[in-house]
Image (tube, helix red, strand yellow):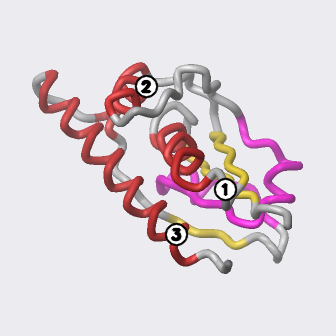
Amino acid sequence: MTKPIVYFLCTGNSCRSQIAEGLARHLGADKIDVHSAGVEAHGLNPRAVATMKEAGIDISHHESKLIDSDLLNRADYVITLCGDANDRCPVTPPHVKRLHWGFEDPAKATGTEDEVQAKFREVRDAIRDRIQGFLNELPQ
């Protein structure tokens, strides 16, 4: 049986979508084929890499990518993680299920280093919980 393709999209494919890709591969590799991209490519956020490493997931090999229209059209699920990506995402064919999970951008967090790291962890954990719920709801 072919695994459904899940495509996570965000503005720059540097933080939230990279975290989502790493978590979804870790939690659901046996259930879904996971990819991520951005409407722009901003490069991988080092704090996202560090935050995922704390959770035992290595995303340091990930690359920041632009949306691939072929993959977008083959996807079963397109999940936008920010309003900008939701607004700017290209039109998808009718078979693609579009979901929007809006998460705060931890890269815009301000304060002490501890406060910024706490925001990254908060967003990572919220994305993890949402992905786990999504995986639990997938048809068997």
Give residue 49's mark. Answer: 2
Image depth: mark 1 or mark 3 in front: 1
Residue 42 shown left or right of residue 139 in the figure: left
Residue at (46, 35) in percent of width and height: 15
Residue 67 shown left or right of residue 2 in the figure: left
Image depth: mark 2 or mark 1 in front: 1
| Amino acid type, label 3 | Phe
- Which residue lies under the disc numbered 1? 30
Residue at (52, 66) in percent of width and height: 100
Q: Using the image, determine if residue 10 lies above or below residue 42.
A: below
* Residue 140 position in % (x across, y down): 67, 78
| Amino acid type, label 2 | Val
Residue 124 shown left or right of residue 87 in the figure: left
The residues tagged by marks 2 and 3 sit, at their Cα atoms, a distance apart of 23 Å
Give residue 134's mark. Answer: 3
* Residue 56 position in % (x across, y down): 40, 32
Q: Earlier in the sequence, mark 2 or mark 3?
A: 2
* Residue 1 position in % (x across, y down): 85, 67
Asked whether 91 falls inside the magenta stretch, the response is: yes
| Residue 131 visible in the picture | yes
Q: Mark 3, residues whose alpha carbon is within 10 Å: few (<14), some, or many (≥20)?
A: few
Q: Earlier in the sequence, mark 2 or mark 1?
A: 1
Q: Secondary structure at mark 2?
A: helix
Give residue 51's mark. Answer: none
Pick the front one: 52 or 36: 52
Q: Using the image, determine if residue 2 lies above or below residue 118.
A: below
Start-end of magenta stretch: 66-92
Asked whether 9 falls inside the magenta stretch, the response is: no
